[in-house]
Image (cartoon, rainbow, N blue to C red):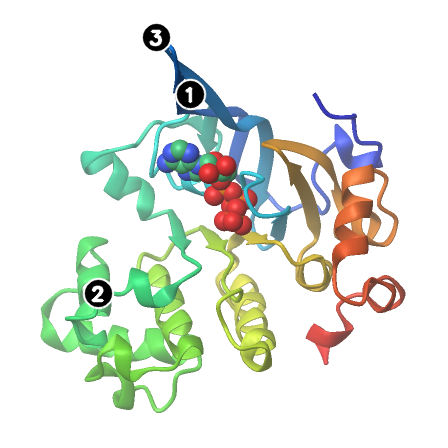
Amino acid sequence: MTTVPTTDAQNGPAAGAGEVILEARDLVKDFRGKRVGLHRQRFRAVDHVSLQLRRGQVTALVGQSGSGKSTVGRLLAQLMPQTSGELLLNGQPITAHRGRAFIRYTSTVQMTLQDPFASLNPVHRISYILARALSIHGHAKGAEEIEEKSLALLRKVNLTPPERYLRRFPHELSGGERQRISFARALAAEPQVLLADEPVSMLDVTIRKEILDLLDQLRTEENLAVLYITHDLGSARAYSEETLVMYRGEVVERGSSADVIDNPQHEYTQRLLAAAPNPRRRLSNPGEEFRG
Ligand SMILES: Nc1ncnc2c1ncn2[C@@H]1O[C@H](COP(=O)(O)OP(=O)(O)OP(=O)(O)O)[C@@H](O)[C@H]1O
């Protein structure tokens, strides 16, 4: 359907040499579309997408709204079954949509969502949210260990002093703090992969850099393989090694983030860059506004 990308990394290995933790091969996701006469149309949201997430590296998935980025994230998180294609975790084919298999999978692969308020249950205190995650994944037992590990998780996401946060409810926190709690909850599983779906798009511009710096810090300290889903090319350039560009369900261009964003080959990537605010500045010094 779309033109073939031309960056060097198109068919080769992902940028960098980290070990592959999670791999998607030829993922397809069809949704049921509108009914036309007696037939229901099929809508292909993800069209033969392959990618590899590597230990200690960030891979950015960029594209405009509706291009299929979040659906790829949800498929990788096993929140829904793919129509076809394969997922491999540490080289092993995996299907874990429900039950114990799903819980086991989430011990390795965690996802955080765009709206941290919606994903944190408003009736529970932060202490409960973290305790539950620690217990589900079997990383703490007994009140004392749970509190100690919860405090450590809060420190990891730079919420200090951590004691101040345990008794609070999500609505008592700022958007940035809530996103930090989402990361802390994900880290409670001690995952190898973090799928971060638009982690800063609902946050105030002034704190976006702080949260992306935190993601970068966690990737390094926890040696996580990170998928960074975003519509923002500047931050993809600044915070990821590899960038994949999605258009209408397909990956139309991929390569090192520097190559893809400084020297886009696909016409759609060029259009995305042209539509970005102040694209010249981003092209001349990409990531400037994020790196500060
Ligand atoms: N459960 C669903 N049922 C039917 N269609 C869906 C479903 N989820 C997503 N879609 C459709 O699939 C397409 C891709 O959606 P998706 O949310 O993956 O895009 P996106 O690139 O993440 O966009 P955004 O940045 O706005 O979140 C859209 O047209 C969307 O309407």
Give the residue at x 40% y 63%: 115
Which type of secondary structure does the marked residue at label 2 adopt? loop
Question: Could you classify mark 3 by the number of other residues whose Cα lies within 10 Å: few (under 14), some (14-19), or many (20 or more)?
Answer: few
- In space, the residues marked 3 and 2 are separated at their CA atoms by 41 Å
In the rendered structure, which amino acid carries the disc numbered 3? Answer: Leu
Which type of secondary structure does the marked residue at label 3 adopt? loop
Give the residue at mark 1: 83
Q: Position of residue 153 (x, y in %)?
A: 34, 73
Give the residue at mark 2: 121
In the rendered structure, which amino acid carries the disc numbered 2? Answer: Asn
The number of numbered badges drawn on the structure is: 3
- In space, the residues marked 1 and 3 are separated at their CA atoms by 22 Å
Question: Could you classify mark 2 by the number of other residues whose Cα lies within 10 Å: few (under 14), some (14-19), or many (20 or more)?
Answer: some
Give the residue at mark 3: 38
Give the residue at x 41% y 41%: 74
Please say if 285 is above or below 240.
Answer: below
Please say if 124 is above or below 118.
Answer: below
Residue 3 vs residue 208: left or right? Answer: right
Which mark sits nearer the N-terminus, 1 or 3?
3
Judged from this view, the residue extending furthest toward the top is 38
Q: Position of residue 175 (x, y in %)?
A: 41, 76
Nearest-to-viewer mark from 3 and 2 = 3
Give the residue at x 35% y 78%: 154
In the rendered structure, which amino acid carries the disc numbered 1? Answer: Thr
Quarter of the rendering containing residue 136: bottom left
